Image: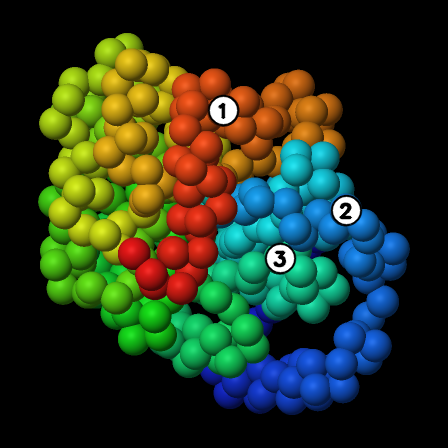
Amino acid sequence: MSNQRPNLTRRNFLSATATGAAGLLAMNNAGPAAADDPGDDAKETADNPADRKLIDCHLHINHYDRTIEDTIVHMDATGTGKAFILPLETGEGGVTLRTETVLHAYHRYPDRIIPFCQTDIRQPDVIERIRAFHLLGCRGIGEQKEHLPLKDRRVEAVIALCDELNWPITIHFQDGPNGYNQGIADDLETYLQRYKTVRIIGHAQSWWSHISADVPPAEETLYPTGPVKPGGLLDRLLGEYPNLYGDMSAGSGFNALSRDEDFTAGFIERNSRQLLFGSDCPCYDGRGENFKGQCYSTQLQDFLKRIVSDEETLADLFYNNHLRALEGTA
């Protein structure tokens, strides 16, 4: 997949989007037979993968050049029924995935993919683009990941739009000079106080560093280890704001949850309706064949099943909370 961003003017994009929307709406109105045939993998079976009670809140299609079909294979191998597929149009962070590609995947596998949108919020047409993606069937914004401070007015503009659209937004929090949405400790609560409808889904290193009250400087480490000091920012904010959710994906999520299992058991119990299983996994096969023998999805699933004994809590972590975040039902 090319990492070159097409040179779209605002007028050209909106014209192309209108054409695409008309085509997709016509395809929907014509029924399933009018869509591209997704092949046997997406057809109804006695054991329909979409019926599995596991939703991955954080998955990209082209991690390590993984195709749409490879991504479905990964989902099947990890027991994942559905996934939030998060584009990254700017390529910041090493992955480039356009929203149009996610929408194409959604119309091939509508029972498996929950499409999100993302576009460069530094561009003047960002609001028009996101509104167009809303009309095309996207369910939220994510992964919001540009080299901007969290308090930047352009970050607030997309949060405010999600509040208007009754949408979730997945935000990558990474402090430090080369980070994204820097300033979680100072600025996140301002948005939570100002916008009550949007569901903010926290993700990445600086989000999970704040599981502890003792947070080292980002320049020192983004992956703190050792015992967690109670009284961290996450416990307080999750306790006070029901529209805040935690994305447990990637190495940052697993590191935070596994560094102090005694603390984590209580943390999950306190916040069990606001934590989302996710993987952010780049492997193809659920066994990490192309990723150092590691699959973030199976690793986190095994950990949660070992540390959480209550089946209702597991159902919340693996499935129910995702629906609450999507629909705005705290």
Visible residue check, residue 218: no
User: Amino acid type of disc 1?
Assistant: Lys
For the point 56% across and 59% down, which residue is it? Answer: 114
**Residue at 22%, 17% in the rendered image:** 228
Label 1: element kind: helix
Taking depth in this image into account, of 60 and 249 the one nearest to the observer is: 249
- The answer to whether residue 208 is left or right of residue 140 is left
For residue 164, side relative to residue 135 (left or right): left
Residue 190 visible from this viewpoint: yes
**Residue 290 position within the rendered picture, expressed as x and y whole percent measured from the top left:** 71, 27
Disc 3 to disc 1, C-alpha distance? 24 Å
- The residue indicated by pointer 3 is 113
Q: Callout 3: helix, strand or loop?
A: strand
Q: CA distance from mark 3 to mark 2?
A: 17 Å
Instruction: Give the residue number, with chain letter if any, for mark 1.
Output: 305
Which of the two marks, 3 or 1, is nearer to us in this view?
1
Up the image or down, 76 lies above or below 320; here it is above
Q: Nearer the viewer, mark 3 or mark 2?
A: 2
Judging from the image, what secondary structure is the residue with disc 2 in?
Answer: loop
The mark nearer the N terminus, 3 or 1, is 3
| Image quarter of the C terminus | bottom left
| Residue at image point 44% right, 73% down | 130
The kind of residue on which mark 3 rests is Ile
95 or 282: which is nearer to us? 282
**Left or right of 321 on screen, residue 110:** right
Q: Is residue 311 above or below residue 52?
A: above
* Amino acid bearing label 2: Asp
Q: Position of residue 208 (x, y in %)?
A: 30, 32
Which residue: 26% across, 18% down?
A: 263
Q: Which residue is mark 2?
A: 47
Q: Position of residue 227 (x, y in %)?
A: 24, 12
